[in-house]
Amino acid sequence: MKQLFVALLLGVAVITGILWLNYGTTAVLAPKYAEIRNQTFHNTAAYNDGMVNDLADLHLQYLGARTQEQKESIRAVILQRFAAYPKDRLPAELRDFYFSL
């Protein structure tokens, strides 16, 4: 009976240790894994094409704006949305437009 109790206690301790180790490993590696996934996403053609299309649409809205307030609000959206986007990935026309703001 005593041996059975010790074996069960040891089994519970081993399982708890394995779960705790898994939790610790996940806590350390999860942020690094998420960063790699984020970088991979930002390097995809779909993301880059989408950003270029968004800026092209905003460019057309900016050109079609009737008042200075509309232009300023679109300008603020563009500057905020593309602040962290690499400008060298933009076509020359949109890059010139961005830097003219």
Image (cartoon, rainbow, N blue to C red):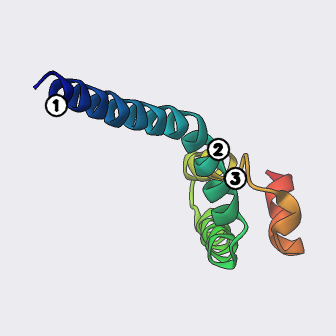
Residue tagged 1: 4
Amino acid type, label 2 = Lys
Q: Amino acid at mark 1?
A: Leu
Mark 3: amino acid: Phe
Q: Is residue 101 left or right of residue 5?
A: right
Quadrant of the image occupied by residue 89:
bottom right
Residue 26 horizontal/vertical position (percent): 50, 40
46 or 11, nearer to the observer? 11
Q: In the rendering, at what x and y percent does residue 25 appear?
A: 54, 37
- Give the numbered dot on residue 82: 3
Percent x, y of residue 76 = 62, 44
Q: Secondary structure at mark 2?
A: helix
Q: Name the front one of labels 1 and 3.
A: 1
Question: Which residue shows up at 73% across the image and 47% down it?
Answer: 84
Check disc 2 and report the residue beneath it: 32
Residue 68, x across and y down, in percent: 62, 48
Label 3 and label 2: CA atoms lie apart by 24 Å
In the displayed structure, 6 sits above or below 54; it is: above
